Amino acid sequence: MFLMERRRAIAVFLVSAVSFILTGALWAGDVASFVDLGFSENGKIYMFAQYGVDEHTLRPWSELYIVDVERNDFVPDGRISYRHDKPVALGQDGSAALLRIVSYNTGLIQKYRANFMRQGIPLFISLEDIRSPDGQTIDFRDFERGVYYDASLKSMLYGGGAKLQSSFYILFNSRNSAGVKKTYRVGSPDVRRAGVTTYSVKKAIVNPERTSMILVIEMTVQNGNGADIRYMIEAVKLNK
């Protein structure tokens, strides 16, 4: 029995090692993890975070964001970042940096009444690897409310190489069971982000009352040797 368990453990280790090697070969860069930290009770505030490990220094990092949904912008003190001064231990994923930034900012979280227990309800999750500079079109449905949604992300590239910049915006439509259609335009096409080559919608989530929609945007960012993955959001106040 011991020998069998040992062989099984070795097999799992080899599979994990091969997976790690293949992942490293296919993707060179720092891949962030997105974390939904919840809405306020009225859906006016949304909080999220991202974290990861710097591929060069192996130091964990995290970023915390608090968003005014109606303005689709950060609250005045709603952008916080943390960089640890030591590298992670073998096998760690950097999530400790997320716990650190949350625990250090409980006062700010309470100020805006973001509620960890009010995470978004997912209506769309992309399982495809879409990294096209031409944009993206998606459609999905809120089955509980009978509302159909579609979104078209349009991206623009400027310059090239080390001077590359980009921007995007999203045309977002909803249509209820009675056929009433509403159109929203979100994003800031005038904001040019250095080094970002592609944008894609990875998730669409709503608050429990269905008054606020969050579109989670994945960004591919040049880093010299490859590309990093980072996240941002676009917030939509849904009109009834």
Image (spheres, rainbow, N blue to C red):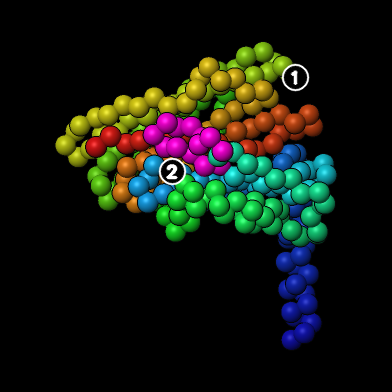
Secondary element at image label 2: strand
Answer with left or right where residue 48 lies relative to residue 118.
Answer: right
Q: Amino acid at mark 2?
A: Ile
Q: State the residue in front, 11 or 78.
A: 78
Q: Residue furthest top?
A: 159
| Label annotation for residue 97 | none
Q: Position of residue 27 (x, y in %)?
A: 72, 40
The quarter of the picture where the C terminus appears is top left
Q: Main secondary structure of the magenta part?
A: strand
Q: Position of residue 178 (x, y in %)?
A: 16, 37
Could you tell me if the residues under marks 2 and 1 are in contact, i.e. CB atoms within 8 Å? no
Residue depth check, mark 2 versus mark 1: number of the one nearer the observer: 2
- For residue 162, above or below residue 232: above
Asked whether residue 223 appears in the rendered view, the answer is yes
Q: Position of residue 65 (x, y in %)?
A: 56, 42
Q: Amino acid at mark 1?
A: Ala
Badge 2 crowding class, 10 Å Cα cut-off, few under 14, some 14 to 19, many 20 or more, is many
The residue at the point 50 percent across, 36 percent down is: 75
